[in-house]
Image (spheres, rainbow, N blue to C red):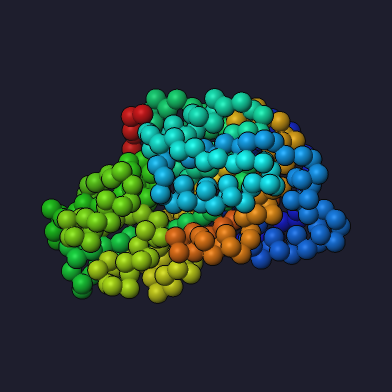
């Protein structure tokens, strides 16, 4: 990841809300180690972000909107950040779950909320970067929400269960098995149109197979059927597999990162196995209503900079296969959103997938 200097310079709301520019995920994020260096310099100057947030005063109540039911990864991390934002950005922070339409209801809720700093969305990137290309009747535009910062990122894994012979140990062997057993060529995903779905569909295209998607409402039901042998394979965030790998009933054949995951270091990447186009990760990000004043957005961004990189956040995220990450600025995150949206627009067109809202 590239190093970026911490800056509190205001940027124009037009620049952020239009999502201009292009970037990659790594180029717009500050990792924990990088931020520690930046924060140390800021402390010397008496400019640590949390101090500035407190100096500017706190709002009474912040609503943290999550477009998924309680108990999932997105909800769990939102609740952890809500705890940390209390007393820093707002006196009270409450998490409101607005499940439905694969996360779309959460986006709509924040789009229609007052633009006064009292509402913020936490969501996987798919709702902002993929859905606008795959849902012809989507009720919102990416520009309806204002990018504040990333919070996490994750890689994806291709997991197989007991329905696939133990002799299948890598992606090419799996493809050969599917071609020899076309009636078993089904892959599960946490939802149609999600990024894990796109990853598996791209693999299907590259491999020349004709696998069929089985879309589940989240990862839990799919993991149960993967373990039971009813589902041959599953494309999902790697955190969904971690607790099951030691027992050996689920095997990971590949991960999508540029390098092997720290959480499954023995599993090769897709690129190592001849599929470099399947090098991708998904961020989870914070957004506010599009017309939120830049001063308020910067205040939230500054608060998150000091909180996401804390050790307890990394310790909380690790068992879920997640890596905390924070954007260097509003502008940098806006560039990431724009670049990823352009990238996934091309992938969706290549796959030929469309969905109904």
Q: Quadrant location of residue 131?
A: top left
**Residue 285: percent from left, percent from top:** 55, 45
Give the tally of numbered discs. 0
Q: Is residue 70 left or right of residue 177?
A: right
In percent of the image, x 61 and y 37: which residue is there? 62
Q: Quadrant of the N terminus?
A: bottom right
Q: Is residue 301 left or right of residue 112?
A: right
Residue 14 sits above or below residue 189 on the image: above
In percent of the image, x 63 and y 36: which residue is there? 61
Residue toward you, 259 or 31: 31
Residue toward you, 299 or 127: 299
**Residue 348: percent from left, percent from top:** 39, 40
**Residue 122: percent from left, percent from top:** 53, 42
Q: Is residue 207 left or right of residue 73?
A: left
In percent of the image, x 78 and y 63: which residue is there? 40
**Residue 303: percent from left, percent from top:** 69, 48
- Whether residue 336 is visible, yes or no, is no
Q: Quadrant of the C terminus?
A: top left
Q: Quadrant location of residue 90?
A: top right
- Whether residue 14 is visible, yes or no, is yes
* Direction right: furthest residue: 45
Residue 270 sits above or below residue 110 on the image: below
In percent of the image, x 66 and y 66: which residue is there? 33
Q: Quadrant location of residue 137?
A: top left
């Amino acid at each position: 990841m590239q190093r970026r200097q911490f800056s509190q310079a205001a940027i124009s709301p037009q620049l952020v809300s239009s999502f201009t520019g292009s970037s990659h995920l790594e180029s717009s994020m500050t990792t924990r180690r990088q931020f520690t260096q930046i924060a140390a310099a800021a402390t010397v100057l008496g400019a640590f972000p949390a101090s500035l947030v407190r100096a500017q005063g706190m709002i009474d109540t912040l609503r943290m909107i999550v477009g998924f039911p309680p108990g999932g990864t997105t909800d769990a991390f939102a609740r952890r950040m809500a705890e940390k934002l209390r007393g820093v950005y707002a006196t009270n922070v409450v998490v409101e779950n607005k499940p439905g339409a694969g996360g779309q209801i959460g986006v709509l809720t924040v789009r229609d909320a007052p633009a006064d700093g009292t509402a913020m969305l936490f969501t996987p990137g798919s709702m902002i970067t993929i859905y606008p290309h795959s849902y012809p009747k989507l009720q919102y535009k990416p520009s309806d929400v204002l990018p504040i910062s990333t919070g996490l990122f994750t890689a994806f894994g291709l997991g197989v269960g007991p329905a696939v012979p133990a002799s299948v140990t890598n992606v090419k062997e799996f493809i050969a098995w599917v071609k020899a057993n076309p009636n078993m060529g089904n892959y599960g995903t946490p939802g149609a149109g999600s990024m894990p779905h796109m990853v598996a569909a791209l693999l299907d295209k590259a491999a020349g197979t004709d696998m069929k998607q089985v879309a589940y409402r989240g990862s839990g039901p799919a993991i149960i059927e993967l373990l039971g042998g009813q589902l041959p394979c599953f494309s999902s965030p790697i955190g969904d597999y971690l607790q099951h790998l030691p027992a050996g009933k689920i095997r990971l054949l590949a991960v999508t990162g540029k390098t092997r995951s720290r959480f499954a270091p023995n599993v090769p990447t897709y690129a190592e196995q001849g599929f470099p186009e399947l090098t991708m990760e998904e961020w989870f990000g914070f957004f506010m209503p599009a017309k939120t004043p830049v001063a308020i957005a910067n205040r939230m961004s500054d608060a998150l900079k000091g909180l996401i990189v804390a050790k307890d956040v990394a310790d909380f995220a690790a068992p879920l296969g997640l890596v905390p990450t924070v954007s260097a600025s509003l502008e940098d995150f806006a560039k990431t959103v724009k670049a990823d949206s352009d990238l996934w627009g091309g992938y969706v067109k290549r796959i030929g997938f469309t969905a109904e809202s």
